[in-house]
Amino acid sequence: MSKHMIVKASRRKFLQYGSLTLGASVIAACSGGTSSSSGGSDEAADLGENPIKVGVMYSTTGTIAIVEKSLQDATFLAIEQINSGTGPWEANGEGIAGRKIQKVVVNPNSDWDLYNQMSKRLIEEDQVVCVLGCYTSASRKSVLPVFEEKNSLLYYPVYYEGNECSSNVFYTGAAPNQQITDSIPYAYENFGPKGFFIGSDYIYPKESNRIAKAELEQAGGQVVGDEYAALGTTEFITIINKIKAAKPDFVLSNLVGDSIPAFYRQYKDAGITADDIPIMAYPTTEEEIQAMGPEFAAGHYTSFNYFQSVDTPENKAFVEQFKEMFGGDRVTNGVMEAAYLQTFFMAQAMKDALEAGEELNTETIRAATRGQEFSAPQGRVKIDPDNYHTYLYSRIGRWKEDGQADIVFSTDAAVKPIPWSQVLYKGRTCVHPSPDDRSDPIKETGKDLETQYLES
Amino acid sequence: MLDFSLTSMLSSLFLLAEEAAPAAEGISWIALLNQALNGIGIVGILLLTGLGLAITFGVMRIINLAHGEFIMLGAYVTFVMQDFFKMDLLMTIPFAFIGTALIGAIVELTIIRRLYGRPLETLLATWGLSIVLQGVVKLIFTAELKYVRAPSYLSGNLSFLTNEAGTSPIAISYYRLFIIAVALALLALTMFLFYGTSWGRQIRAVTQNREMAKCLGVNTKLIDMGTFAYGCGLAGVAGAVISALKTVAPPMGQDYLVDAWMVVVTGGVDKLIGILAGSFLIGESNAIIAFMLNDPLARVIVLAAVIVLIRYRPEGLFTVQKRA
């Protein structure tokens, strides 16, 4: 009898405490995220009349949060500057032609399916005019059908593997010809012909390495190893031993996220120096180097459009303003800069459309974004009016002991983007008609496309 | 998936066969030997991360899905100690132990204590706890990766067989040796505590027959709390030691959770020495298979092998004869 009572009592207790734990965990999983839309009523009061609703979709929880949180920070800085008429927006006054941006923030929790659902919600329920967001190619592929079906607009700030040209996406990160095409010949000439390619096991690293392999073989080199590790892996001794056995002249790394610090640390720990076998990487930026400790990256290379050490007045201001808003120990990197500059592309396009007396919708913003130019921290950049990718600088940085890059290669002006690797798909390019009727934009020219630069 | 793994297996086998022909036989053997030696480094990490779980699950039978988060907490304690007090990594280890053990004790007092004998509810509660701990750490430290400095006197490699070019094809880093040493020392200490002290005897008495132990005057509640806190403390030490070699971030614990479970389940939960065997088997086979094929495939094969093993030896490799 009494035993029965005890069981009963403790069951009730379990329900109490158990539901408490579970409830707390649900709150933790969703906090700040799924429902922090429109930023509360006090902020709405500051936004004046008729604000412009813009979706901001980055994960602030889950495995990719490490990167996407800083993209969100950079986006918030840009929106703040636009709304208050400071920074690069100083000449335009507060807001966009008097209207401020109301950001609708969602957190897809690093879950590819949630990106899809949340983009639907942003477009249908919150009725945003466009969305800034996504980081991994997997998440972009997940939302692409939504933006195409609903005919809405996504500004995507990340270097990616190319092979895409949607009427509903503006790509403000590097296309293959703005990152791979310069870095592979550089590695071939400066390090040697034998490359060992590694990456995380998903679409971007595999596709990027496939393009790099074709580039290296065209230059006369060869790939002596090709290894992939599951996303989030932090044990690299096997891959490092394979690198030691293969004796390459350089390593090309497309590892992403928390794998990066672990790999560089174990690489040095295993006794391989940057003089023996230098690493050329794409996703390794100032942020990851701060996390691993700069001494582990010193002497290795990264190819990117932007480094914190780029010497322009715009960059000096950007770094200063970012640190002021988020803390002096923070660093800026290439993806953050892209997230920052694309917000201004969007704002400029909206301003042009509003000043021409047009309503803000997908058609008018799209038409106005084509050909926008902006003096970004990396230099003067422009949205290509034909393929919706962005003219960007191509740079290679050699990491120093202080965690900043010594820029060893830079184009003189921004390079015209080509969404398809010309080694793999010779002559394939993309031209959206004007006005964009969303017909198939792919054009096979069959010719070698010459590298073109943005004229100043 | 199957198709993918099959083709990649075939292609890597093909590559292996192709490479074996022109390369001199001796070189690949030396590389393999080097890999086997470095596999010991993986064994050390597995042993270290599995040890805490061997206490909380193996001894106390608590299905602890928050084990990885205690490893993460240990790493963050080390980060805080280094960042604020400029401590050497070795100096932070006691703090990591005490800090996580304290949190472990609080968790036992508030959650686990009320769920003894109900494995399913424990599983749910610890799973929730792991999400809460990750969330709290993210709120305090943000989601950014954190930097923990390795002591400079542990850099460098112990090398064998230096060739004429001055490079050594067989080498293992001092830091990995250090991890192995810490893991073995903790294992020895734990075995001494459990089999050589009266506290250990009480723990074993409580696990074997709680009611009888209570009758004989053992303070079972205190024993439970102490044991759970000790297991969490060990996880914290693991976090502190590996933080300099790997990445410190809120979700880092998830990575070690699965491995720790595999080790404990393979080795058998009744004897502490079982986890030495479990981590050795899993670590070395993982290293060798990954070297022959590739990392993701090695993981699949080893996991499948563990499942087959559990099918035929559900109690793991090392079991104690029990009365039915």
Image (cartoon, rainbow, N blue to C red):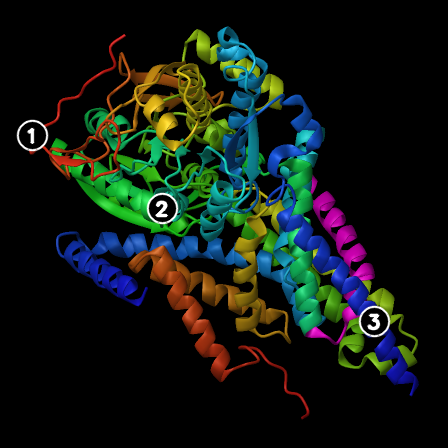
Q: Position of residue B186 (x, y in %)?
A: 65, 57
Q: Is residue B309 above or below residue B133?
A: below
Q: Which chain is indicated by disc 1?
A: A
- Label 2 sits on residue: A149
- Residue A339 occupies quadrant: top left
Q: Amino acid at mark 1?
A: Lys
Q: Is residue B93 magenta?
A: yes
User: Callout 2, which amino acid?
Assistant: Glu
Report the disc number at residue A12. Answer: 3
Same subunit under labels 1 and 2? yes
Task: Label 3: state its secondary structure.
Answer: helix
Cβ–Cβ below 8 Å for labels 3 and 2? no
Residue drawn at 55 percent across, 13 percent down: A320
The chain holding disc 3 is: A
Q: Which residue is mark 1?
A: A447
| A430 to the left or right of A81 | left
